[in-house]
Image: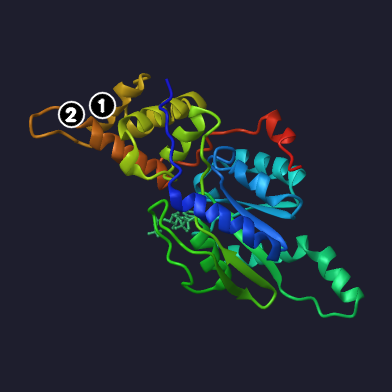
Amino acid sequence: MVVKVQWYPGHMEKARREMAERLKAVDLIIELRDARIPAASTNPLLNMLAGKKPRLIILSKTDMADPAATAEWVAALKKQYDSCLAVDLMRDPHSGRKIIREAIRVMEPMREKQRAKGIRPRAVRAMACGIPNVGKSTMINRIAGKNTVKAADKPGVTRSLTWIHADPELDLLDTPGVLWPKFDDDRTGALLAAFGSINDDILDIKMIAMDAIHEIQTLYPGCLESIYDSGEVNPNGMLKAIAVKRNLVREDGVLDTRRAAEMFLNELRKGKLGGLTLEHVRSEEQEDLPE
Ligand code: G4P
């Protein structure tokens, strides 16, 4: 059974309204999604807000995703949107420049019209959006080339909408990480929680860890077995095996499965379990075209 998760605090609704108001002034939407969960990290509110605005999808954290799955996602998303790039924002120092170049390329028709009128093309105005913890601050820092926005591993840290003169050819409107009022299915909430986009304080960490263990065991059989030296197929049993492997024992001598769950999720979030993608391209992705 997949655990039920819901998290849509008031500041997200406020941010959503502000984003809707500011969209008029924007040429392009740069939307970040987590390469390990490209479907779950897609905010359906954006489809409604974006209308016909050009959209560049950035798959972040590709260094922690399965490369074959990332290639499939990029191909599928390129068909659906104006463009898609997969980036390792942590280790690729050129990732910011690649995003700037792609944003300008996508907006070339607008810039060409300006040139035809004898006007020197102005900087592209892009809104950077994405769910909490997807890598927006890291991306903006890469693009702007300095510590413009503080990256924080705490989902839902409120930020106001601010314009950043990122490059002579690109102005970026930074937006807070926003989720949506109701996840379509329990799996989406469970995946978002497992990868750190939902405030841990409201979660049943053991349940989230067990759901993630189940997903990994289904999609990558043998992966956890080799890391935690256990052939345990039951997620609860695997948590116990993790506690044994990591020597997590409570004062009363019982295995500390809660700390095992926290440690497992931390290892998953930091990519220490290898390149994993827990969602694969489905036919629905092809149908989910913006109106
Ligand atoms: P947000 O603004 O969308 O909420 O996300 P933010 O940039 O704060 O990134 C959340 C975490 O994800 C940060 O880690 C950041 O370093 C990491 N991150 C972002 N992009 C990538 C990527 O492409 N690859 C990898 N491996 N990590 C990425 P953190 O836990 O705060 O740690 P720290 O690195 O800041 O110490």
Residue bearing the label numbered 2: 255
Residue under the image location 32 percent in, 29 percent down: 229
Q: Residues within 10 Å of mark 2 (few under 14, many from 20)?
A: some
Of residue 32 and residue 217, the one placed in the foreground of this image is: 32
**Residue 138 visible at all:** yes
Q: Amino acid at mark 1?
A: Lys
Residue 110 versus residue 272: which sits nearer the camera?
Answer: 110
Q: Which quadrant of the view contains residue 93?
A: bottom right
Q: Residue 76, how many percent across, how many down? A: 71, 40
Q: Is residue 214 above or below residue 97?
A: above
The amino acid type, in three-letter code, at marker 2 is Leu
Which element is circle 2 on?
loop
User: Does the rendering let one see residue 91?
Assistant: no
Residue 14 position, x and y percent, is 50, 54
- From this view, report whether residue 243 is shown above or below residue 133: above
Which corner quadrant holds the N terminus?
top left
Residue 172 as seen in the image, left or right of residue 27: left
User: CB atoms at circles 1 and 2 under 8 Å apart?
Assistant: yes
- Give 17 or 272, whichever is nearer the viewer: 17
| Ligand 1 within 8 Å of the CB at mark 2 | no
Q: Image height check: is 275 above or below 63?
A: above
Left or right of residue 27, residue 148 in this image: left
Check disc 1 and report the residue beneath it.
240
| Label number found at residue 222 | none
Q: Residue at x 52, y 55 (%)?
A: 15
Q: Quadrant of ligand 1?
A: bottom left
Element class at badge 1? helix
Residue at image position (58%, 68%) is 143
Instruction: Specify which label sits upstream in the sequence, 1 or 2.
Output: 1
Q: Position of residue 290 (x, y in %)?
A: 73, 43
